[in-house]
Image: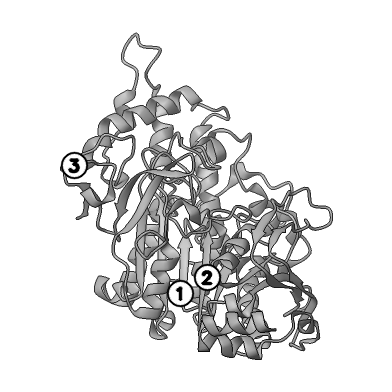
Amino acid sequence: MHVFRWGCLTAGIAICAVAASAQKCSTLTSLKLEHIEITSAEDVPPGRFQAQAQPGSHHVIPPAQVKAFCRVVGVSRPVPDSVIGFEVWLPRPEAWNKRLEGVGNGAYAGRISYGALENALNEGYAAASTDTGHHGSELSFAVGHPEAISDWGERSTHETAQVARKVIRAYYGVGPEHAYFNGCSTGGMQALSEAQRYPEDYDGILAGDAGNNRVHLNAGFLWDFEAAHPNGSLVLDDAALQLVHHAVLEACDAADGVKDGVLENPQACRFDPRTLECKAGETAGCLTPIQAEAVTKIYSGPRNPRTGEQIIGGYSPGSEIVTGGGDYQGWNNFITGPKEPARLDFWKLWVFHDPAWDWHHFDFDRDVTLADREMNMVNAVNPDLGHFAARGGKLLVYHGWVDPVGPPSDAIAYFRGVENASGGAERVRSFLRLYMVPGMSHCTGGPGYELAGGARGVDNPNDMTKWPSPDAEHDMLWALDAWVRHGKPPEALIAAHYGDGKPTRTIKVCPFPQVARWTGEESSASAENWICR
């Protein structure tokens, strides 16, 4: 008792008050909440923590190194046929920073994001994650269970945010002073859905490489696969992709003043694949007209054949071959590598309810319109963030410029939509910033740079030791926290390229539409020698 009281006193009066009113972890199982069941609540000692995969799952969960915490596990049943699993991790009262961090998920996976929970907990946050209302990663989970689509698309993150606040209040005796959501990919979709649908859940939201335009993203996968297989056979082999990639770098790499294998602004690259078409007698080191047309279509992205409207943006020049680590290595993952278009089950099982549906008959006008109507719960594209902004909410959006999963230009299109809905750029700057990260792949990896503080995957914690001391310049979550708590809006952030887990070069990542340019003085490997224009 004396040790606890001394630690409490040295932590400060506010922490003392929280510690004095905190409940025992085990008592949380008796918490009575509408449609919520707390199935377990147990103290976890500091050290190595190993979560167990759900029954029947072959997914391996890496062990975590954690500070002592109270682990709360439960389920929410907000509507019939809805079973949303969640976990809330509560630091010891003297270690809590009096904030909540909700963490996102990846792809269609139905599992708790343990790596992200670990990272949040060790930073002092009470942290919450959901299994999105199902187990496993196959889209068959929704067959016969239509509510499961809504759970995955938007309801599970809201339910988890609500129950987390109640569990926190029951445990500490007070609610969180501020709440943040942090997600990338599907987590980015969840982040934007929270801002659009449930603006009171979180004060600050960090959305990375968001798959928020989900219907159109899946339509884009069909478009890109068809472009690369125009006659039913693949026309873009690895050699063709390498050829295009090197030509892009040769044409546009030095535009920012530094030839480093990274395009700071691919939108400014005017590379035309047809310049690589074979001349008379050439058979190697060039593209056939069919190959050049395929690359052009993938850069352009799908359009509605009737209206000409862009369905979703195309992929950036430079994303053809992605090197430098990460799970996604360019167009191979979703376009040239698979034997059939990615996410076919979305159309077969969710939209058309027909496992035998033939994608070759897809109509980019009629079928996209149908899916937007029927699958609205999986889209988070509403540009009206007025309610979120009115209550003081802050939103940081980031996207890798060579993301080969979610087209980077779609993040820009959403940002421009918010500007139009909000009354212009200056109004938007009061609550939203967009950061386009040079050379970053999907959420992490790639030949370029990474921003710290984001969600690097559902089971891989962000290694905060890469920066000697996180701050609002080096860490997105710190920047978001400073914006919410102190009214200090972020400007340029510092991103790093890593080698052996350490930053080997740094750069400024500017708030869009500004772009970083090397000053031409001293080393281009240091962010201090880059300016935003």
Circle 3: residue type: Glu
Asked if 290 appears above or below 500 in the picture, the reply is above
Q: Please state if 118 lies on the left or on the right of 216 as rendered.
A: right
Label 3 crowding class (10 Å Cα cut-off): few <14, some 14-19, many 20+? few
Picture quadrant of residue 279: top left
Q: Is tag 3's residue or tag 2's residue first in the polypeptide sequence?
A: 2
* Residue named by callout 1: 204
Residue at 53% in and 55% down: 462
Q: Alpha-carbon distance for marks 1 and 2?
A: 7 Å
Q: Please state if 347 lies on the left or on the right of 77 as rendered.
A: left
Residue 230 image position (x, y, % from top left): 51, 32
Circle 2: residue type: Phe
Q: Is tag 3's residue or tag 1's residue first in the polypeptide sequence?
A: 1
* Residue named by callout 2: 181
Q: Nearer the viewer, mark 3 or mark 2?
A: 3
Asked if 460 appears above or below 471 in the picture, the reply is above
Residue found farthest to the front: 2
Residue at 46% in and 66% down: 206
Residue at 63% in and 38% down: 340
Circles 1 and 2, Cβ within 8 Å, touching? The answer is yes
**Circle on res. 323:** none
Residue 363 image position (x, y, % from top left): 54, 50
- Image quarter where the N terminus lies is bottom right
* Residue named by callout 3: 522
Q: Please state if 349 lies on the left or on the right of 210 as rendered.
A: right
Residue found farthest to the top: 281
Residue 434 image position (x, y, % from top left): 36, 62
Q: Alpha-carbon distance for marks 3 and 2?
A: 38 Å
